[in-house]
Every structure is written in C-alpha cells, then in structure tokens.
Image (cartoon, rainbow, N blue to C red):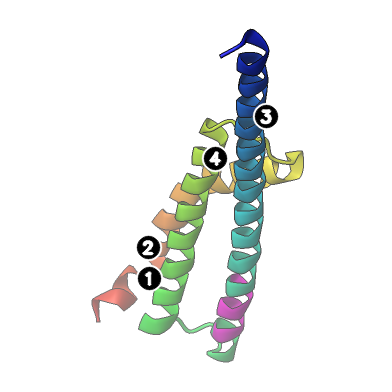
C-alpha cells in the first residue's frame, strides 16, 4: 500500500473513531439528562400520591419511595461510568449529580428509618 494511501486510511480511521466517540459522548449526556427528567417527574407523582394520602405512609407509598431511590442510585452509577469514559457534562449537571451522589446514602438511611416498619407488614 503506498504511503499516501496508508496515511489517508489512518486519517479516515481516526476521524471515524473520533466521530463515534463524540456520538457516544453525546448519547451518554442525553441519556443522563433524560433520566434526570424522568426521575423528577416520578418524584412529583410520588409527592402527589403522598399528599393525597394525607402524608400517611403505607406499603405502596414506601415502595414508591424505594423505587425512586433505586433509580437515583442507578443514575448516579451511570453518570460516574460516563465520566470514567471521559464524557464531559455541563457544569450544572455535574454539580447536580455530585450533590445527589453525596446525599444518597443519607436518603437510604432515612428511608429505612421512615419506611422500614411499613415494609414489614
């Protein structure tokens, strides 16, 4: 293969790899943002259900809280995986996700204290 053809092939291969990495990066950011929006909507629904029940927790409401907590843990894991892969996020997203990750353990402990007795029934 002539030198020019090898260089051209290398440039095309590098361009394709860069485009694929950029697409994967954009996809990761879009997935995280969409998941954050989905969780926010689900939290609004959960709050509405709790208000409709006069803030009296029961098994179903506690399960809803647990499902939301699990979704937030999964989102934090996905966010960190994307960051390890070198994906750059907007500063606002980084701040929100970092704050959320810091409070998840406390939220899990609060769920256990609040909903633990409800889940035993």
Look at the image and say whether residue 47 sits in the magenta stretch. Answer: yes
What is the crowding at mark 3: few (fewer than 14 residues within 10 Å), some, or many (at least 20)? few
Please name the predominant secondary structure of the magenta segment in the image. helix
Q: Earlier in the sequence, mark 4 or mark 3?
A: 3
* CA distance for labels 4 and 3: 21 Å
Task: Give how far across and how far down residue 105 sits, in percent.
Answer: 44, 48
Q: Secondary structure at mark 2?
A: helix
Q: Residue at x 60, y 47 (%)?
A: 28
> Residue 15, labelled with which disc?
3
Looking at the image, can residue 58 be seen? Answer: no
Is the Cβ of the residue at disc 1 closer than 8 Å to that at disc 2? Answer: yes
Q: Residue at x 40, y 55 (%)?
A: 109
> Residue 115, labelled with which disc?
1
Q: Secondary structure at mark 4?
A: helix
**Residue interval drawn in magenta:** 43-49
Task: Give how far across and how far down residue 20 sits, in percent.
Answer: 61, 39
């Amino acid at each position: 293969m002539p030198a020019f053809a090898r260089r051209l092939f290398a440039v095309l291969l590098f361009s394709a790899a860069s485009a694929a990495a950029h697409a994967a990066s954009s996809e990761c950011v879009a997935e995280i943002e969409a998941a954050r929006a989905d969780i926010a909507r689900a939290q609004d629904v959960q709050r509405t259900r709790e208000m409709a029940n006069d803030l009296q927790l029961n098994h179903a409401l506690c399960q809803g809280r647990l499902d939301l907590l699990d979704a937030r843990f999964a989102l934090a894991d996905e966010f960190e995986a994307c960051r390890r892969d070198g994906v750059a996020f907007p500063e606002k997203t980084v701040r929100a996700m970092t704050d959320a990750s810091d409070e998840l353990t406390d939220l899990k402990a609060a769920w256990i204290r609040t909903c633990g007795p409800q889940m035993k029934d």
